[in-house]
Amino acid sequence: MSLVSVPFVGTGVDTVIHVFATVILVATVGAAAYGFWKFHELPIEKAHSKDHHQIGLITALTWIGFIWHWVWVLAVIVAFVDMEKAIISLRDIWKSTPQDNQTKQEEA
């Protein structure tokens, strides 16, 4: 066998190797697309599992997120953060006085 000759060229094995490589390529691209799709649908699945009130908004933001990816980040934030609890917590922090905070620190 010479250094210039390529093994399996012009044989049945050559065709089998090309078919096998094509199947692997298509499977890899398909698996990557499926994984991307499932990851991208994560906010919608979380919203459905929590029976979120803003499922329509989260769905729209997720679909728009395929074009503008920063919108998808907003969908994740809306889906995973309980805004009602966050607003109540911010309200309590806002209304608390510095003396209340100092008393809580001394008790701990």
Image: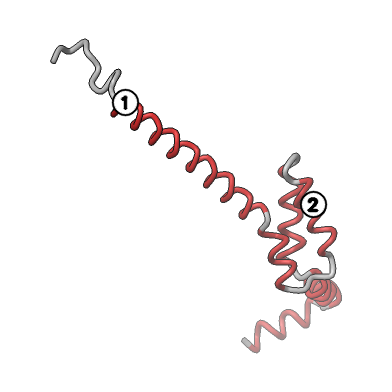
Left or right: where does residue 50 sit relative to residue 6? right
Image mark for residue 61: 2
Q: Which residue is drawn at 71% across and 65% down?
A: 80
* Residue, disc 1: 14
Seen from the viewer's position, the closer of residues 93 and 59 is 59
Crowd rating for badge 1 (residues with CA inside 10 Å; few <14, some 14–19, many 20+): few
In this view, the residue farthest toward the front is: 12
Q: Give whichever of discs 2 and 1 has the lower sequence position.
A: 1
Q: Residue at x 62, y 55 (%)?
A: 38
C-alpha distance separating marks 2 and 1: 48 Å
Q: What residue type is labelled 1?
A: Asp
Give the quadrant of the N terminus. top left
Q: What residue type is labelled 2?
A: Leu
Q: Where is residue 43 in the image (x, y as percent from the top left)?
A: 70, 60
Image: 63 above or below 78 = above
Q: Quadrant of residue 49?
A: bottom right
Q: In which quarter of the image is residue 21?
A: top left
Label 2 with label 1: CB-CB less than 8 Å: no
Give the quadrant of the C terminus. bottom right
Which SS class for mark 1? helix
